[in-house]
Amino acid sequence: MTVFDSERPQGAAADLPDDLLRAIEAIVLVSPDPVPHDLLAQLLEQPVALVEQWCDELARQYREEGRGFELVRVAGGIRYQTAPDLTPYVERFLLHDQRARLSGAALETLAIVAYKQPISRAQIAAIRGVDPDGVLRTLGTRGYIAEVGRDDGPGQAVLFGTTDAFLEKLGLETIDDLPPIAEFIPGPDVVEALEHGLRVTPEIDVSVPDRTTEPFTPQPTGDEPAG
C-alpha cells in the first residue's frame, strides 16, 4: 500500500495511475544513485515534463504527511533521503559503525577542487603549499573527484573536477548550488583583529648600562713604537 492508496488530493499525482506511481517509488527506492527524470520517462513511456510534475507532487505530499523521508532532486536526478529534522537520530545510527573520515588536508583539497575546477595538480599545490598527490589519490578512490580534461598549456596537465558522488554526498543538484565562497571569508575588521592578536612585538632592551664596570683598555703588545 502506497501513500496514495487512500484518498488523494486533486493535482498532478491524482491523475497518475497507481501502477506508474508504484513504479516510480520502486525504481527510486532500489537505485543506489539519483534517478534522472528522462530515464524514468523512458521506463514509464511517458513525457519527461509529466514525469517531473508527478515526482514534484510526490515530494510535496511526502512533506505534507510528515514522513521520515523525502523525495529530493540531487545530482541531476531524484532520490529518497531522510528528513532534515531527523538528522540527530540518523547520525547516531551511522556513528555506531563509523567509517574513516576524510582528513583535514583532504577536505581542504576537496574544497579547492570544488570551487576552482577544472584545476591541475600544480595549481592545487600552489594554493595549499604542499604536494597534493596523496590526497588526490584518496579523493579519487572515494569517488569524489575525477580527471575531467587536459590543460591547453605546455605539458597538457591533467585537470580535476568533482563527481556526481560529491554532489550526492552534499545533497546538491548541480555544482552551482554550492554556497558562495565569500560567505566563508571573514570581513576586514575580523582579519585586522586576528592580525593584531597574532602580531609579535619585538622586545627592545632599554636598560641603563652598568657604569661600575671598568672599560676595556687594550694592552700594548710591545710592537708599537715608543711615543
Image (cartoon, grey):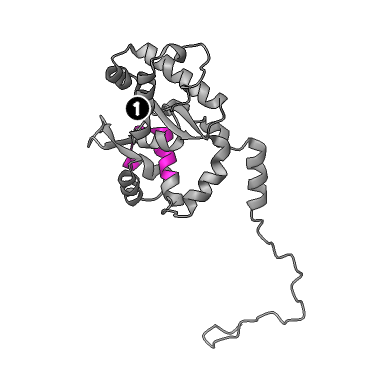
The percent position of residue 49, horizontal first and vertical second, equals: 38, 12
Of the 4 image quadrants, the one containing the N terminus is: top left
The percent position of residue 16, horizontal first and vertical second, equals: 40, 14
- In the image, the segment drawn in magenta is 108-122
Quarter where residue 215 is shown = bottom right
The front one of 119 and 225 is 119
Quarter where residue 53 is shown = top left
The front one of 111 and 158 is 111
Q: Write the residue at 65% across / 80% down.
A: 216
* Main secondary-structure element of the magenta-colored stretch: helix
Depicted 160 relative to depicted 177: above or below: below
Depicted 141 relative to depicted 71: above or below: below
The amino acid at mark 1 is Val
The front one of 11 and 216 is 11
Total count of labels:
1
Q: Tag 1's secondary structure?
A: loop
Q: Is residue 25 visible?
A: yes
Q: Is residue 163 visible?
A: no
Q: Write the residue at 67% across / 38% down.
A: 189
The percent position of residue 132, horizontal first and vertical second, equals: 35, 48
Residue at label 1? 35
Q: Write the residue at 45% across / 15% down.
A: 13
In this view, which residue lies farthest toward the left? 155
Q: Residue 129 magenta-drawn?
A: no
Categorize mark 1 by other alpha carbons within 10 Å: few (<14), some (14-19), many (20+): many
The percent position of residue 32, horizontal first and vertical second, equals: 34, 36
Quarter where residue 175 is shown = top left
The front one of 77 and 56 is 56
**Could you tell whether 45 is left or right of 216 in the image?**
left
Q: Write the residue at 31% across / 44% down.
A: 140
**Could you tell whether 29 is left or right of 155 in the image?**
right
Of the 4 image quadrants, the one containing the C terminus is: bottom right
